[in-house]
Image (tube, helix red, strand yellow):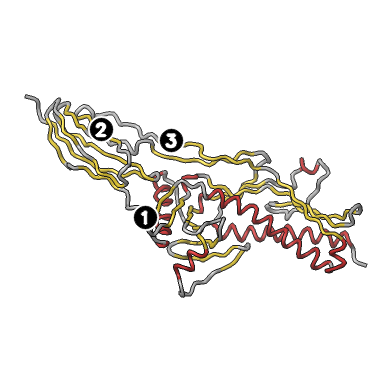
Amino acid sequence: MANTFTDVKAREIDFVSRFAQNWDALKNILGIMNTIKKESGTTLVAYTAEATNGLAESPAAGKPIPATDITVTEAAKADLTVEKYRKTVPVEDVVKYGATVAIQKTDDAFLVELQNNVLTRFYNFLHTGTLTGVEKTFQMALAMAKGKVIDKFNRINKTVTEVVAFVNVLDVYEYVGAANITVQTQFGLQYIKDFMGYSTVFLLSAPNVERGKVYATPVENIDLYHVDPSDSDIAKLGLVYTTDGETNLIGFHANGDYLTASGDSYALMGMTLWAEYIDGISAITINPNGGSDTPSVSLNKSEATVAPEATTTLTATTVPADATVTWTTSDATVATVANGVVTGVAKGTATITATITVDGANYTATCAVTVTAGV
């Protein structure tokens, strides 16, 4: 006679083992380097980091060194909490379909839904990326999505080894046409390896990624936080879940309910894929009729000469045209600047810089100003 307890225990072990194996595979595809155990109720925080007014100018000899102000700001929060789920299989289904179909097949579907729950929250989080832009083609959208995150991490001195992208599957097939591409599947996800400069490009459908959108982030920006369902405090409630004994990402327990003549399966988990830097996520829109030109700023003069107390006016031309220009001087004891109007102070040279910031990146133009000796 079969040992029913042993059969149920083996089913629990099989469920959590398959869940863990799937997540290990996904971690490898995504390049996730950190799996971090946290307590339930932990608040996860995403940040932005930016030099407030760009890099401060290097001063003239003997002058004080100005500080470059870099501001780290909380941009998004989420709670890491325990989530609990239940699946019920009535005895009628076992009689009608057999145990293999009624139990095993519904276990499979249950596992997929639990996985998708975590992934969907991550996709929604990607939508909040702040490195935005508009490009005319799918190819340029992918290129700029990668370029923007690499540029961002370079400017905060963070290492980028690989960048992953998330795109709409229809956009990919529209782009490649009849070309032969190798699409792989893991964890229910389709992806392409080594595609257009990316280590991995994930092919998703709406609403996870709408047509005409491209998201990208470095693998270093993705962490997996989780609560351990085998925690001793949880067991004190009399709730004992089977876990895989390694990462313990999920707890699973099955038992029969004589009152309803059904088999209940319980899952306990607390998992969140989280990006440490929300401004390390690019979100590019494809618009064939629009598209943004490369941001830039230029001045009407590259050199100017002015006497003390006299003025000369610099005019900045920017792309986009409505960009805000910030004016700075390398040496306020030689020349000052306000809204492009340069005023000579004392004999010497100074560099006047016009700066615009677009999607977190700074673009500059300079004018070398010589102040002549006063009469």
Q: Amino acid at mark 2?
A: Asn
Considering the image in quadrants, where does the C terminus appear? top left
In this view, the mark in front (1 or 2): 1
- Snapshot quadrant of residue 262: bottom right
Q: Which residue is mark 1?
A: 291
Q: With respect to residue 334, does 198 lie above or below?
A: below
Decide: marks 3, 2 in contact (CB < 8 A)? no
Q: Residues within 10 Å of mark 2 (few under 14, many from 20)?
A: some
Q: In the rendering, at what x and y percent does residue 156 appear?
A: 42, 43
Q: In the rendering, at what x and y percent does residue 218 appear?
A: 48, 53
Q: Amino acid at mark 3?
A: Thr
In the displayed structure image, the side of residue 272 where residue 348 appears, left or right = left
In the displayed structure image, the side of residue 297 where residue 82 appears, left or right = right
Q: With respect to residue 75, does 86 lie above or below?
A: below
In this view, the mark in front (3 or 2): 2
Q: Amino acid at mark 1?
A: Gly
Mark nearer the N terminus (3 vs 2)? 3
- Snapshot quadrant of residue 52: top left
Q: Which residue is mark 3?
A: 71
Q: Which label number is shown at residue 93? A: none
Decide: marks 3, 1 in contact (CB < 8 A)? no
Q: Callout 2: helix, strand or loop? A: loop
Q: Which residue is mark 2?
A: 339
In the displayed structure image, the side of residue 333 where residue 180 appears, left or right = right
